[in-house]
């Protein structure tokens, strides 16, 4: 190494992490500490790993969807119609019985 011993209280080691966006982040740890297998990339926040050839995949970020889009995803149109129909029937019967007044 060739570096003179400077008598630091806590000798440190540098560990390099790699994220899916090809950032290299050098994190220093106390020599006696065990470096974790993964570390959040300080540049982009994605998980980063010690393996430069195999960084952890970026988590999928779902675009914002409306509630209706989620409902449509889970149900077919026919099912949605049945559910809507049931809801209308219920609403009508409750309105008739005076539960709902409008
Ligand atoms: Zn990154």
Image (tube, helix red, strand yellow):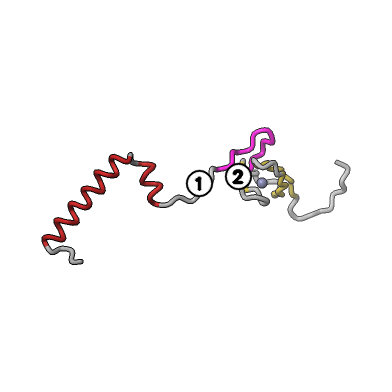
The residue where tag 2 is placed is 47
The residue under label 1 is 62
Front residue of this view, candidates 35 and 8: 35
As drawn, the residue found furthest toward the left would be: 97
Q: Main secondary structure of the magenta part?
A: loop
Indicate the secondary structure of the residue bearing disc 2.
Answer: strand
* Residue 99 is one of the magenta-drawn residues: no
10 Å crowding of disc 1: few (<14), some (14-19), many (20+):
few
Relative to 97, residue 71 above or below: above
- Residue drawn 66% across the image and 51% down it: 42
Q: CA–CA distance between discs 1 and 2?
A: 17 Å
Image height of 33 relative to 96, above or below: above
Q: How many marks?
A: 2
Query: Could you say where residue 26 lies in the image, as x and y percent from the top left?
Result: 72, 47
Helix, strand or loop for disc 1:
loop
The magenta segment is 48-59
Q: Is residue 101 left or right of residue 54?
A: left
Q: Residue at x 62, y 50 (%)?
A: 45
Residue 73 occupies quadrant: top left
Q: Residue at x 85, y 41 (%)?
A: 1
Where is residue 8? Give x, y as percent. Answer: 79, 54
Q: Nearer the viewer, residue 15 or 54?
A: 54
Q: Residues within 10 Å of mark 2 (few under 14, many from 20)?
A: many
User: Quadrant location of the C terminus?
Assistant: bottom left
């Amino acid at each position: 190494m060739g570096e003179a011993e400077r008598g630091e209280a806590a000798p440190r080691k540098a560990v390099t992490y790699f994220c899916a966006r090809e950032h290299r982040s050098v994190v220093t740890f106390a020599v006696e500490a065990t470096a974790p297998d993964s570390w959040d990339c300080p540049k982009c926040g994605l998980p980063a790993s010690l393996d430069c050839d195999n960084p952890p995949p970026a988590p999928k970020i779902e675009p914002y969807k409306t509630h209706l889009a989620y409902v449509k995803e889970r149900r077919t149109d026919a099912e949605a119609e049945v559910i809507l129909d049931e809801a209308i029937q219920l609403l009508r019967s409750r309105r008739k019985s005076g539960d709902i007044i409008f």
